[in-house]
Image: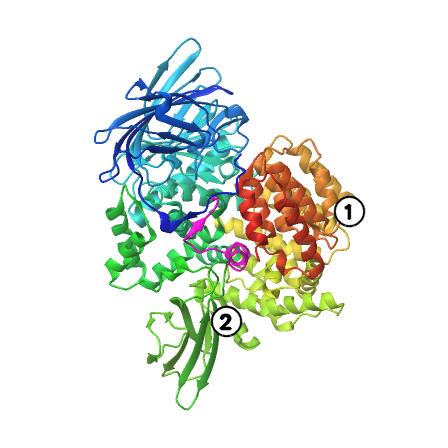
Amino acid sequence: MRTDTGQIVNLADYRPTDFVLERVDLTFDLHPTETKVEARLIFHRREGIDPKAPLVLDGDELVLSGLLLDQSELPTEQYDATPESLTVRGLPESTPFELTITTVINPEANTQLMGLYRTGGIYCTQCEAEGFRRITYFPDRPDVLAPYTVNIIADRAANPLLLSNGNFLGGAGYSEGKHFAAWFDPHPKPSYLFALVAGDLGVVEDTFTTLSGREVALKIYVEHGKEPRAAYAMDALKRSMKWDEERFGREYDLDIFMIVAVSDFNMGAMENKGLNVFNDKYVLADPETATDADYANIEAIIAHEYFHNWTGNRITCRDWFQLCLKEGLTVYRDHEFSADQRSRPVKRIVEVRHLKSEQFPEDSGPLAHPVRPTKYREINNFYTTTVYEKGSEVTRMIATLLGRDLFKQGMDLYFDRHDGQAVTIEDFVRCFEDVSGRDLTQFSLWYHQAGTPLVTASAAYDAEAKTFTLSLEQMVPATPGQTAKKPMHIPLRMGLLAENGTVITPASVIGAELTDDVLHLTKQTQTVTFHGIPSRPVLSLNRSFSTPINLQFSQSTRDLSLIARYETDHFARWQALIDLGLPNLLQAARDARQGIDITCGSAFTDALLAAAADESLEPAFRAQALALPSEADIGRELGGNNDPDAIHAARQTIIKRVAEAGKQVFTALYDGMQTTGVFSPNAASAGRRALRNTALGYLSQLDETPARAKAAYDAANNMTDLSAALTILAQRFPDTAETAAALAHFRDRFADNALVIDKWFAIQAAIPGAGALERIRLLMETPLFKRTNPNRVRAVLGTFVFANPTGFGRADGAGYHFLADEILEIDPRNPQLAARILTSMRSWRLLEPVRADHARSALMRIERSNNLSTDVRDIVDRILKE
């Protein structure tokens, strides 16, 4: 584990490598503790480079056991080898040369789960971002592309399956008890996309015929006995392949596409060329063990990793500063896929909920950074919601600015112009400039400036002149390293609604460009006048969340209610309901802190219940409308001096007030939204289940006993309903015999299913209140808890610190110090996992003073540790920086 403070890497310092890598031939002789890796690398010196310049290769905890130059052993005075680097001197000046490097590594001891590791009898690799250097010495950076040939030798009985990237060349017996397999990937790729899997797994097989008529073999590998649970993943894969052909014209390019599901994995999945490696929670599903959310996640993540084949693999990043070019762009593509497969408005609501709950706090706190950073200490810490989700939003804004047709033309040009290259954000944006003729220089500030813009709006109507005037002002707040910001190009979808909800089309617009329904805010202040408006309109602004901003626009309850009732943009209807409810929640939190009785406005309750009962709206939308802003959302909007207990009490009181007012509505929904027949994870059925379980949650607020929730648990015939009922029991009636019995039943029924037991842990880890910490300690002492499994740690510790504000944020600070203990325990074993969990402390300065002091004390204890990984050191230093 690297424990230095970490060297700062700057975008401005980028330069190409001195040597060009032409070819990679790898041979692995697999052994649990002594795997021999032979890497034959062919280089030539780049033109114009000093003929005496040495070749410097990256390493990480490596030991060199052999080094040949053109098959001759190098004298020791010609090279320097450390665990972190290999420097070779005296290399040919003008001709290609072959360097053969041999290392011996211990996969079984690799608890970081980076590089080549062995878990559950399976050899597996994870090389993004800098894991390949844990396998062999290499120029481990994304702009070094080469074709790979891979030979794998292993014990036949223990490892009947030997997989790597590309197309299968063949295999045979090797020596007594061993066999080998050879793979060739003809598409030049960076080392972070290298993959190897070996072991004994079951397989689900299918085929896909591409638009050009080629037949591609599809294989999903899972643990034996779990093959039926991979059927939905296979279906999602085939739908993804078809969609990418139809929407973006992208055809798959190898003879085989493989997915391997493993249980010990730091990430969700990895898009290695032709051999995706997945956390098994995003592959395995059946009605008994997977929720509707699980099915939706599997669909989205299967698609995401497949879409990387073109946006990330065929075209990759020049350097890690361009990470959003593959991740943000591909998130946009998977969002569009899911929107086409399911409900576009509901999908958009889910996306924005996630963006506001995760990315907005990141953008406003000590971990803020641009979508394209300019420096980093540890690249693993920049796999963030800013790069992924905000990066996706920037791509979406380009599509909004240009329109569907020009956006498609820009993407086509990007694929044609840059296939097989490692490129930059500038290369990407230039494609859209070239097809549209639009200068996107100002728009590109979205890549370069951190922070969430605040747009303040005010409006006035002149009945005599029949004009509607909109005044807009934008401000981008200061963020670490960026104090002065320039005005952004902000595309705002908008509509002017008449009293009956119809859209009013202005005769002319002065003061801003308006293309279709997109208003372009490009200056710090802008006044826009709409002419030919016959009556006072209601302004619906930032429809479909066209731009990721904080919008400050004071609208009357009447106007918001009209939008919530009539808007044809269903996202805007949902946002209007949020805007009606949020002031009630914020005032309730303030009142709870001061011991004042909490009230709830009837306009909000009426609008919410009207939406809930509106059968013209799809059930999934109604379920989203009824899901009030979370406690974290309320804390973010309060902006400081936050008391988690007061926020929790306020939200629960408002929920109960809504339940009391809507008892008849919720009873009707619970009784009327049952699904019958064979379980289906399709959007319509999932929406009905979501609405019914939401209604059950509201009704439980009126129940004095757990009878109704327990009856729902006993009657459930699928995991969605079962886990929903169990969650209600645990949250609403945590200390009852019925809840204890249900938890025990759930545990015993699914004891052999690790993914379901993760749900069992997470449900309990989220139970609020001061007693949560003791519950967490007890859960971590149970035989089912496994510290070495990232999924299990995230289910318990991750849920506690990210999703249990009152339990984690106890007034005595015990939760914060408990987290510090756990970070210091996890870090030596798995730095990435420790660093990501530590980001739960990013908003500690928003706490009220007593809690903030406790949080700072816990963070200082981590900071003072002498043996922190660079991953954790980077996070704690940035969180504490004034």
Q: Is residue 46 magenta?
A: no
The amino acid on which the numbered mark 1 sits, given as a three-letter code, is Asp
The spot of residue 826 in percent (x, y) is: 61, 37
The amino acid on which the numbered mark 2 sits, given as a three-letter code, is Ile
Q: Nearer the viewer, residue 36 or 537?
A: 36
Q: Can you identify the residue that label 2 sits on? A: 563
Q: Which residues are magenta?
A: 355-378
The spot of residue 431 in percent (x, y) is: 27, 55
Q: Residue at x 45, y 74 (%)?
A: 473
The spot of residue 114 in percent (x, y) is: 48, 33
Q: Nearer the viewer, residue 707 or 35?
A: 35
Instruction: Give the tally of numbered discs.
Output: 2
Q: Is residue 729 visible?
A: no
Left or right, residue 418 beside residue 738: left
Q: Residue at x 50, y 56 (%)?
A: 368
Q: Is residue 434 visible?
A: yes
Q: Earlier in the sequence, mark 2 or mark 1?
A: 2
Q: Can you identify the residue that label 1 sits on? A: 735
Q: Residue at x 46, y 32 (%)?
A: 60
Image quarter for residue 602?
bottom right
